[in-house]
């Protein structure tokens, strides 16, 4: 198999010219204090019997990379002879989950079964995921050229990397180490963007309520004889109904748009829609979003309600 560059950014990398012995590298990683799990990876190029063109294959040794992918249908492979492919592969080749295909590597025919469809719109959507042992009959047999290590809780990444670098100094092995549950920077960036957009939308909605309530509040200060608390309560009560209507109407419309727009975006990217992206709103979330309409209305009305409560009678009369 013709290997491609290993994925990810390596942490320790030896400076020697010696080729890494996979068995020695794996033994060194397992012997290093703090190692919780390790996944060996490599990449190469194969063809599909009866098809044309080369297709990239991503091979795993160990616990595989199931946690790194969202599945659209089927399941992750459980061992040799099973592969997981993206939507674009299925659309291009005309196959479906459950079909058997034959991969060809250096003239060796490798029969496999498609057991899952994964969300992988990048890489032109043509990357096959499989167990490294699937290609054991190919000579030379593939071996890991990159190792993804998960550390035990409380393990210092810096200390672990220094120790492993020393142990692997005579090889060119590439290893990436992360704490268990480490968040991908790309995911963090998207989450931060979503939070920022949400704050902006809530702020705009609150300012819209503020603008609409100001005129009504000017009328409330004419109601002489009310205590400040009664005035605030009267102003806030007047917007609760509008908030309930906004939530009751806006949440179903937003949910319906979500169910339409997300699949359209995924199809434009050449992929199906994984449940993790589509089914994100449960009953609790929808109810909270509906109540959020009332909260936004009340928050937007707080400023004019406070002004009305503090206004003196003379000031109220001058606004007439």
Image (cartoon, rainbow, N blue to C red):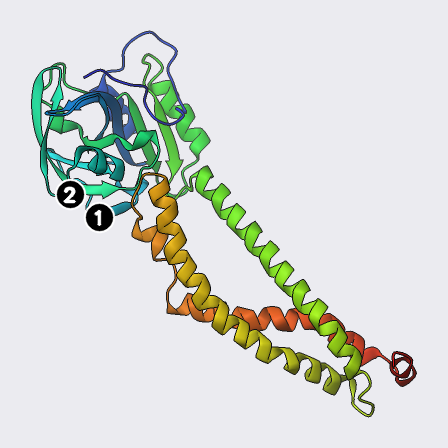
Say if mark 1 contacts mark 2, CB within 8 Å: yes
Vertical side of 138 occupied by 82: above or below: below
Residue at 31 percent of width and 37 percent of height: 120
Q: Can residue 34 be seen in this view?
A: no
Numbered label attached to residue 73: 1
Vertical side of 296 occupied by 64: above or below: above
Please tell me whether mark 1 sits on a helix, a strand or a loop: strand
Vertical side of 36 occupied by 45: above or below: above
Q: Tell me where residue 177 appears, x and y as whole percent.
A: 38, 31
Q: Can residue 183 be seen in this view?
A: yes
Q: Quadrant of the N terminus?
A: top left
Measured in 3D between alpha carbons, the distance from the residue under mark 1 to the one under mark 2, in whole angstroms, is: 8 Å
Q: Quadrant of the C terminus?
A: bottom right
Numbered label attached to residue 97: 2
Residue at 26 percent of width and 23 percent of height: 43
Residue at 20 percent of width and 37 percent of height: 90
Q: Tell me where residue 15 appears, x and y as whole percent.
A: 39, 11
Please tell me whether mark 2 sits on a helix, a strand or a loop: loop
Numbered label attached to residue 258: none
Tell me which numbered mark, 1 or 2, is placed earlier along the sequence. Answer: 1
Count of marks overlaid on the render: 2
Q: Tell me where residue 191 appears, x and y as whole percent.
A: 48, 47
- Along the line of sight, which residue is nearer the eye, 80 or 85? 85
- Along the line of sight, which residue is nearer the eye, 172 or 316? 316
């Amino acid at each position: 198999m013709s290997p491609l560059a290993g994925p990810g950014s390596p942490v320790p990398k030896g400076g020697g010219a010696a080729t890494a012995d996979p068995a020695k590298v794996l033994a060194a990683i397992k012997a290093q204090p703090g190692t919780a799990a390790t996944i060996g990876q490599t990449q190469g190029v194969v063809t599909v019997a009866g098809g044309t063109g080369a297709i990239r294959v991503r091979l795993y040794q160990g616990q595989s990379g199931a946690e790194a992918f969202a599945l659209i249908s089927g399941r992750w492979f459980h061992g040799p002879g099973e592969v997981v492919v993206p939507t674009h592969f299925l659309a291009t080749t005309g196959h479906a989950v459950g079909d058997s295909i034959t991969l060809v590597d250096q003239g060796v025919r490798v029969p496999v079964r498609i057991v899952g469809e994964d969300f992988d719109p990048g890489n032109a959507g043509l990357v096959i995921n499989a167990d490294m042992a699937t290609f054991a009959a190919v000579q030379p047999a593939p071996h890991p050229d990159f190792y993804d290590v998960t550390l035990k809780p409380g393990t210092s990444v810096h200390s672990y990397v220094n120790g492993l670098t020393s142990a692997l100094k005579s090889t060119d092995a590439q290893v990436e180490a992360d704490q268990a549950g480490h968040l991908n920077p790309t995911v963090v960036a998207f989450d931060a963007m979503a939070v920022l957009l949400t704050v902006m939308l809530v702020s705009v909605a609150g300012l819209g309520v503020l603008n609409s309530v100001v005129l009504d509040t000017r009328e409330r200060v004419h109601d002489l004889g009310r205590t400040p608390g009664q005035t605030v309560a009267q102003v806030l009560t007047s917007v609760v109904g509008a908030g309930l209507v906004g939530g009751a109407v806006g949440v179903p419309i937003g949910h319906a748009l979500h169910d339409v727009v997300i699949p359209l975006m995924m199809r434009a990217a050449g992929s199906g829609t994984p449940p993790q992206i589509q089914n994100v709103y449960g009953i609790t979330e929808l109810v909270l979003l509906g109540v959020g309409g009332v909260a936004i209305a009340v928050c937007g009305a707080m400023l004019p309600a406070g002004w009305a409560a503090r206004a003196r009678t003379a000031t109220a009369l001058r606004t007439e």
